[in-house]
């Protein structure tokens, strides 16, 4: 099969991946083989090939937003030809304290797709069958791929914040994850208050139906029930806290934060306000979000790259020049709603 391989010994900036002909993966017990249809390109992939994340394997195929068709190792839930989506969490040990308590996103021994095991920048991928999420009918491969990382985690953030229908919710920062989360919030009839830097982001928030939009120094005109912060800045977390009603929750959707500034406990956290971080996702998050994406007819704007253009796709993510989410498209699904149609360069929302 053809694959884009990251070799940590030889990769150079801009030519991180080499496109190679390598043997198809051999299935281990419990795995199934996907013929990859599309694989989203995430900023984490760039962190892997730039070695910001230390290499775990000398050679690895990146890609953790995989949409594929089952061609081997079919299960009752995923028969031959069924479409599945695979995300960053490619497996857990199942028996650590966290797994036994329904918190598999915090597992002590997780498997990371496209990092600790091979991912989806290839024609085929072997994945754990129990971590392959059935793709709802009606959600096409290209639309689903970019939802599998930022989309699912944005959705989990809403859960961690405890958002309920009709509530007042603040979104601090407005990138790709927030622009998917706002659609969910609208479907839940929430009032949405967006605080973000940059005219383009504020315009985007307005056009997606925000109730109120302000710049980074603005404060929402009402007390918020929940807030989710997307910006990697501690100051933003404090801003979000200061907009919260008593008993409200701030969920931090950022892997790293610069320093957390000191803040006034009596005014900002007293009154049972809560501050929570969001780490990874569970399979249930992925499955629930994919079903919702189908129901709400999500069609994220995507820019399509071929496997041979995998380095360009990473470059587009690095320089933020992609026209929508970067997706590597391997092939059209046989018998899917896309078969026979030529793939447009971008799919608008
Ligand atoms: Zn990702
Ligand atoms: Zn575990």
Image (cartoon, grey):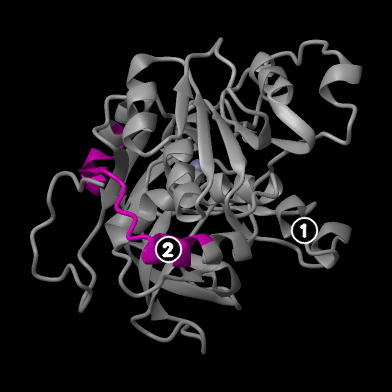
Residue 297: numbered disc: none
Residue wearing tag 1: 103
Identify the residue at horizontal 70%, vertical 49% (top origin): 162
Please check the rendered image and state whether residue 288 is part of the magenta-colored stretch, yes or no: no
Question: Percent from the top left, x then y, of residue 171?
Answer: 55, 32
Question: Percent from the top left, x then y, of residue 255?
Answer: 64, 32
Judged left or right of residue 1, residue 112 is: right
Please check the rendered image and state whether residue 302 is part of the magenta-colored stretch, yes or no: yes
Judged left or right of residue 146, residue 99 is: right
Rendered position, 164 above or below 77: above
Q: Secondary structure at mark 1?
A: loop
Rendered position, 303 above or below 46: below
Identify the residue at horizontal 89%, vertical 32% (top origin): 271
- Alpha carbons under labels 2 and 1: distance apart: 26 Å
Classify residue 236 by image quadrant: top right
The reply to whether dot 2 and dot 1 touch (C-beta < 8 Å) is: no
Taking depth in this image into account, of 204 and 5 the one nearest to the observer is: 204
Judged left or right of residue 18, residue 26 is: right
Tell me the magenta residue range.
Answer: 289-311
Classify residue 298 by image quadrant: bottom left
Q: Is residue 121 visible?
A: no
Q: Earlier in the sequence, mark 2 or mark 1?
A: 1
Q: Does the closest atom of ligand 2 sit within 8 Å of the Cβ of label 1?
A: no
Classify residue 226 by image quadrant: top right
Judged left or right of residue 264, residue 208 is: left
Question: Percent from the top left, x then y, of residue 282?
Answer: 65, 59
Taking depth in this image into account, of 211 and 181 the one nearest to the observer is: 211
Identify the residue at horizontal 41%, vertical 70% (top origin): 135
Residue wearing tag 2: 125
Q: Secondary structure at mark 2?
A: strand
The crowd level at tag 1 (other Cα within 10 Å; few <14, some 14-19, many 20+) is some
Taking depth in this image into account, of 318 and 206 the one nearest to the observer is: 206
């Amino acid at each position: 099969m053809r694959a884009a391989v990251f070799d940590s010994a030889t990769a150079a900036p801009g030519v991180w991946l080499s496109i190679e002909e390598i043997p198809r993966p051999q299935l281990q017990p419990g795995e199934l083989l996907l013929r990859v249809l599309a694989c989203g390109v995430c900023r984490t992939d760039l962190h892997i090939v730039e070695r910001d994340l230390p290499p775990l394997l000398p050679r690895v195929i990146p890609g953790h937003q995989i949409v594929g068709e089952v061609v081997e190792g079919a299960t009752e839930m995923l028969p031959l030809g069924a479409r599945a989506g695979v995300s960053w969490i490619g497996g857990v040990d199942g028996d650590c304290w966290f797994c036994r308590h329904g918190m598999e996103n915090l597992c002590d021994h997780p498997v990371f797709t496209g990092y600790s095991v091979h991912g989806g920048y290839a024609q085929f991928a072997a994945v754990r069958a129990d971590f392959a999420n059935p793709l709802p009918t009606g959600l096409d491969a290209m639309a689903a791929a970019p939802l599998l990382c930022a989309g699912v985690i944005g959705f989990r953030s809403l859960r961690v914040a405890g958002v309920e229908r009709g509530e007042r919710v603040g979104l601090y920062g407005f990138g790709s994850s927030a622009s998917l989360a706002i659609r969910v919030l609208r479907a839940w009839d929430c009032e949405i208050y967006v605080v973000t830097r940059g005219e383009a982001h504020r315009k985007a928030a307005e056009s997606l139906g925000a109730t109120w939009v302000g710049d980074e120094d603005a404060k929402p005109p009402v007390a918020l029930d929940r807030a989710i912060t997307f910006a990697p800045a501690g100051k933003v977390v404090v801003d979000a806290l200061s907009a919260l009603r008593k008993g409200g929750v701030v969920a931090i959707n950022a892997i790293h934060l610069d320093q957390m500034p000191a803040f006034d406990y009596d005014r900002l956290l007293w009154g049972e306000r809560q501050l929570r971080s969001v780490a990874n996702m569970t399979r249930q998050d992925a499955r629930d979000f994919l079903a919702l994406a189908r129901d709400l007819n999500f069609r994220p704007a995507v820019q399509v790259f071929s496997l041979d253009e995998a380095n360009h796709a990473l470059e587009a993510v690095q320089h933020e020049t992609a026209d929508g989410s970067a997706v590597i498209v391997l092939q059209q699904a046989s018998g899917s709603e896309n078969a026979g149609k030529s793939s447009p360069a971008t799919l608008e929302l």
